[in-house]
Image (tube, rainbow, N blue to C red):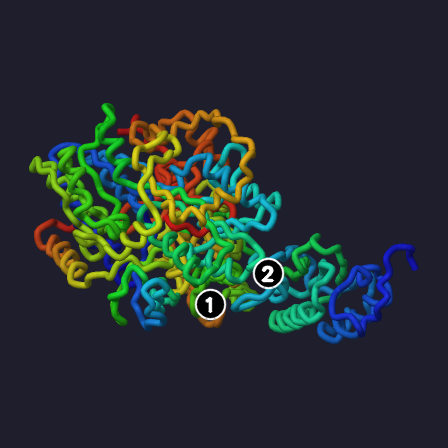
Amino acid sequence: MKYLDDFRDAAVLRRQLIELKSLASRRWIIMDVCGGQTHSLLRHGIEAELEDVLELIHGPGCPVCVTPVSAIDDAIALARLPGVIVATFGDMLRVPGSSDSLQTARAAGAEVRTIYSPLDAVELAAREPDRQIVLFAVGFETTAPSTALALLTADKRQIRNVHALVHHVRVEPAMRAIANDPRNRVQGFLAAGHVCTVLGSRDCEPFVRDFQMPVVVTGFEPVDLVAGLTACVRQLEQQQARVENCYERCVRPEGNLTARGWIDSVYEAADVEWRGFGVIPSGGLVLRESWTHRDARRLLPVDRPQPGQVATDCRAAEVLSGQLKPPDCPLFGTVCTPDRPAGAPMVSSEGACSAYFKYRPQAGAAHV
Amino acid sequence: MCLGIPGRITAWIERDPLTAAAEVDFGGLRRVCQMACVPEAETGQYVLVHAGVALAVIDPDAAEQLLQTLRDLGDEAPVP
Amino acid sequence: MSDGPVCPLPLEAGDRITLAHGEGGRLMRRWIEERLLSLLSNDILRDLPDAAHLTCSSSRIALSTDSFVVSPLFFPGGDIGQLAVIGTVNDLAVSGAIPRWLSLALILEEGLPLAILERVLQSIAGAARQCDVQIVTGDTKVVPRGAADQLFINTTGVGELIHPVPPGPRHLQPGDQILVSGPIGRHGIAVLCARESFGFEPPPASDCGPLHAPLMTLLSAGVTPRCVRDATRGGLAAVLHEWAGQADVSFLLNESALPVTADVRVACELLGLDPCHLANEGTFVAAVPEDQVEATLALLRRFPQTANATGVGTVVPRRFSPVEVLRASGRAMPLDEPSGAPLPRIC
């Protein structure tokens, strides 16, 4: 596959790794923000290979992991309404809400379908005019254009029976929350490559200005990841702090203005809850006033019981902000496994806990 | 975020700014993708597709430049 | 006649299975005689005995059973009928037996169109001919609407043990080679795409196909693998994890050696799936002593179903991870055991 295979080339990768190892004079601490990057770094053995040279902390860039319990519960409540079909990405099916997941709710008779694209939910609504379709709209700014387009398309085609349960999150406020935390140890960031495809590399500049740390826009294939790490280390070695774009084939300085336009026409920034973090100011996207006619929450009965706070020993916040390595969590691998997850980072394939469980179950801080 | 896969535009199907669509060939499978974010893309170009929506036209020169820089690494670094 | 609900319509007027068909009376008998027997006819079945009496040429037999509940019933490359025959044939074959006879049990949902049942039966008949097996006994039940998803099938197969059989995973030794008989993940992708309408073109096809001919040729030539399994649910990863659980070894696969067709590759990239975790219905995994690899592959490659057989890895002394894959970075990383149905993801 073009533009994929070349960036997984073993010979190139091995030379890159040698070069990176020779470059680092000390063990720098770098955060990869995006769950897809985490997954790739672990699966392909890059983190393991660089263990002696870099401490990689995996950030909260897993939208599945940070979707709050209340949003999952809302989705389940909607799925249980007669005549409603919840259309969701497969990632969300097994995430635990306060008592159920969409998958267990489906097993008990709720109508939940997996989709590949948000536009599929609109087609579903067109095919099933007697049903109410709810699109579970989660994801970062990478996914927001697609859910926005789904709603715009529904309006244009006058397809009335589709709504969105929105919980989009924004990466930059989360990075700020991490950098502002007095316990932060991260010295440089790999910015989420596909988010930057939409927002542009220039969008990272305010962060660099405010925190004086290198931010390197990085892709997802092994070669891209090591290129990003190398650029970050080079900056750190030279005490530089600037935005650098190592994913130029997909990311422009201004990003994709058309995509940003689609997002802006439907959504606006708002304070939203990140599971395990609490509310992050401007941390998410919500439907604009003019789009509330598509808000799926309007379908929910007003007087339904709100589930209480879920008592859990899951330490997702510490994991997602890089304070705790998953294998060092007392629940890891014993009480909490992918089959019986205590929290979201163990459910999602991009969650740090799940990635460690699959690829590096022994790699706790004690093994540094 | 994540799964973004490159594919080649084989044919434009719909040019309306909102419901723009094109057939994209991923090198083994084809799918009609939503093109409203890349209306300027041309048949034959590669686009990055996430959740059925094309988000960027891939710049072949940038790709080649990165690969060339990395190939040049081989001339200096010892190979195991 | 019972006091319960009675279907007032004769068979000729109905085009769907009804509960009356399950009452064991005239309706079902006529349908069996008119349709089922004509499709599956053989000397044993023709008399519809309570039990089939079979004459075996070997003193030891293999017995295997499997139930088939796939949805959708029809998918590119196969259907539930073919699967029901081929699945059990392959289970017998990988255990070292020559498949000979099958039983066929059908559980039909009330309301199932007879045209669909007919189509499935034709597939069963065709697959039985293809696999050189006879369907010698069977059963039909009808359940109320909603109690089954259109149609469930169980087949139980008997095979003759003539040749030396693969002794099993306890005999695995470091240095043995892991082979697959063809590209992996095709059935899993085919069924997933057929069920979910992702819009991929051309629709990926299943690898559903019989493996008894290449396997019998291997065994009769004296080339006996340590162990063989068809890699159904859970794929290659499930088989290797299972073997690792029974033997004190680990497996090291070579990522660049894993055969994957282009359409499965693309589907997996788009959906975030791993071909090693996906089902196959015409592909087996075998562990073979190193000095037998060349002969094994040469034999297998003569058959269309196993024309692309290839080595994918090695048996190694037991390490922390039961199954590992050598990645582009040069590191061997764990390949986890699949849990539950593969879910497409966006991130």
Q: Nearer the viewer, residue C320 or C340?
A: C340
Residue A153 in which image quadrant? bottom left
Question: Of marks 2 and 1, which one's residue comes earlier in the chain?
Answer: 2
Residue A250 spot, x, y in % from top left: 22, 56
Is residue C178 shown to the viewer in this render?
Answer: no
Q: Are marks 2 and 1 on the same chain?
A: yes
Q: Is residue B75 above or below residue A325?
A: below
Structural crowding at the residue carrying mark 2, measured as other residues with C-alpha within 10 Å and reported as few (<14), some (14–19) or many (≥20): many
Residue A66 spot, x, y in % from top left: 38, 37
Q: Residue at x 12, y 49 (%)?
A: B78
Is residue C207 shown to the viewer in this render?
Answer: yes
* The C terminus of chain A: image quadrant: top left
Residue A179 spot, x, y in % from top left: 22, 31
Q: Which residue is denoted by mark 2 in the rendering?
A: C87
Q: Secondary structure at mark 2?
A: helix
Q: Which residue is denoted by mark 1 in the rendering?
A: C203
Structural crowding at the residue carrying mark 1, measured as other residues with C-alpha within 10 Å and reported as few (<14), some (14–19) or many (≥20): many
Residue B54 spot, x, y in % from top left: 31, 60
On screen, residue A323 versus residue C16, left or right, reads left
The answer to whether mark 2 and mark 1 are in CB contact below 8 A is no
Dot 2: chain letter: C
Given this view, does label 2 or label 1 mark the residue nearer the observer?
1
On screen, residue C344 versus residue A243, left or right, reads right
Q: Nearer the viewer, residue C81 or C184?
A: C81
* The N terminus of chain A: image quadrant: bottom left
On screen, residue B73 versus residue C41, left or right, reads left
On screen, residue B30 versus residue A192, left or right, reads right
Q: Secondary structure at mark 1?
A: loop
Residue type at numbered disc 2: Gly
Dot 1: chain letter: C
Residue type at numbered disc 1: Pro
Residue A241 in which image quadrant? top left
